[in-house]
Amino acid sequence: MDPKYQRVELNDGHFMPVLGFGTYAPPEVPRNRAVEVTKLAIEAGFRHIDSAYLYNNEEQVGLAIRSKIADGSVKREDIFYTSKLWCTFFQPQMVQPALESSLKKLQLDYVDLYLLHFPMALKVMEKCKDAGLAKSIGVSNFNCRQLEMILNKPGLKYKPVCNQVECHPYLNQSKLLDFCKSKDIVLVAHSALGTQRHKLWVDPNSPVLLEDPVLCALAKKHKQTPALIALRYQLQRGVVVLAKSYNEQRIRENIQVFEFQLTSEDMKVLDGLNRNYRYVVMDFLMDHPDYPFSDEY
C-alpha cells in the first residue's frame, strides 16, 4: 500500500487514515473554495476529510467528494469522512436530526465518524451508529476525567473510537495521549499547525508555531517545511493528524509527510517544545460544567 494511505485500526474494527484534511475556514472565505480545496486534497492523496455541521461547508465538501467519486478518482469506501456536532446542540434530541441534516447536505448515506463535544448525548450517538448513519462514533476536546466518565457509564454500548483535541508541539498532550492509548482510543490532533489564527478563537498576540526556531532548524536539517516537521512529529507518536490548508501548494506539500522520518533525538527535541500552550480557548464556554478545553485530569 502507498504509505500516504496508511491507516490505523479503531476499536470497533473500522480503519482511519492517519493523515486527514481539515476543511474549516473563517467566515470571510467564500464557501465555494471548500469545493476546490477538497478536490485538490483528494487529488493529492488525502483520503480522510474532516468537517463539521458548524463549519457550514458540508454541502460544498460533499460536492467535492461526489465529484471525485464520479470521475473515478476514488470510491466512496476510499474516503473516511468525519463530521462533528458542536456544543451548541446541548439537547440529546437534536443529535440525530443534525446528523441527518449533514447527510442531506453531503448527499451521502453515512459518515465514517461522528464526533460529540459534550457527554450528555452519547446514547443518541449510539443510536446513530446502530441506524447506520455513522460507522464509528467518537468524542472531541475531552480530557481524561471526561473520558473516564464516558467509559464508566452504565450500559455503555460503544466505546469512543477516538478523541479529537488540539495537539501540536506547544501542546503535546502527552498525558492524554498515554491515557487514550491505554484505553484503545485514538488521539486525533486538530490545530496541529498552530491554527489559522482567526480572531474569534485565537489571541492575535499568540506565538506563531511554524516560526519556532527549533522547528525551523529541524525543517532545515531534513530539507522539509516546518509544517511537515510538526505533522511528522504527531505521526511518529501514534497520533492521527489533521492538516488544514486552503493553499494548493501547501496541500500538496503536506501529503509528503510520509517521505521522511524524524530521529529519536529529533523527537526528544520536539517534546521539549511543550509549554501546555492552548491556541483554542473559547472563554465564552468556561462556565459550562463540561468545559471542553480544560487540562484537568
Image (spheres, rainbow, N blue to C red):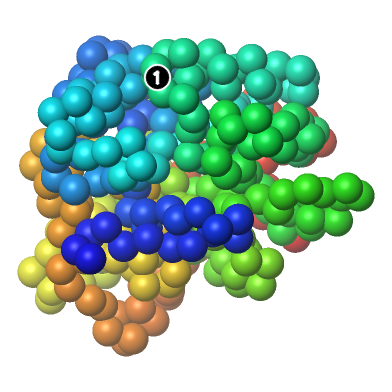
Q: Nearer the viewer, residue 232 or 255?
A: 255
Q: Identify the amino acid type marked 1.
A: Leu
Quadrant assignment, res 183: bottom right
Q: Nearer the viewer, residue 116 or 213?
A: 116
Q: Viewed as shown, does residue 286 lie left or right of 180?
A: right
Q: Viewed as shown, does residue 291 lie left or right of 254?
A: right
Q: Is residue 209 above or below residue 95?
A: below
Q: Secondary structure at mark 1?
A: helix
Quadrant (top left, top right, bottom left, bottom right) of the N terminus: bottom left
Q: Residue placed at 19% from the left, 48% from the top?
A: 45
Residue with the most extreme right position: 154
Quadrant assignment, res 177: bottom right
Q: Position of residue 292 (x, y in %)?
A: 67, 40
Q: Residue placed at 66% from the left, 72% from the top?
A: 182
Quadrant (top left, top right, bottom left, bottom right) of the C terminus: bottom right
| Residue on which disc 1 sits | 106
Q: Position of residue 242 (x, y in %)?
A: 37, 48
Q: Is residue 233 above or below residue 153?
A: below
Q: Is residue 257 visible?
A: no
Q: Position of residue 67 (x, y in %)?
A: 20, 23
Q: Nearer the viewer, residue 145 or 32?
A: 32
Label 1, residues with CA under 10 Å away: few <14, some 14-19, many ≥20:
many
Q: Is residue 66 visible?
A: yes
Q: Residue placed at 39% from the left, 81% from the top?
A: 268
Q: Residue placed at 41% from the left, 23% from the top?
A: 108
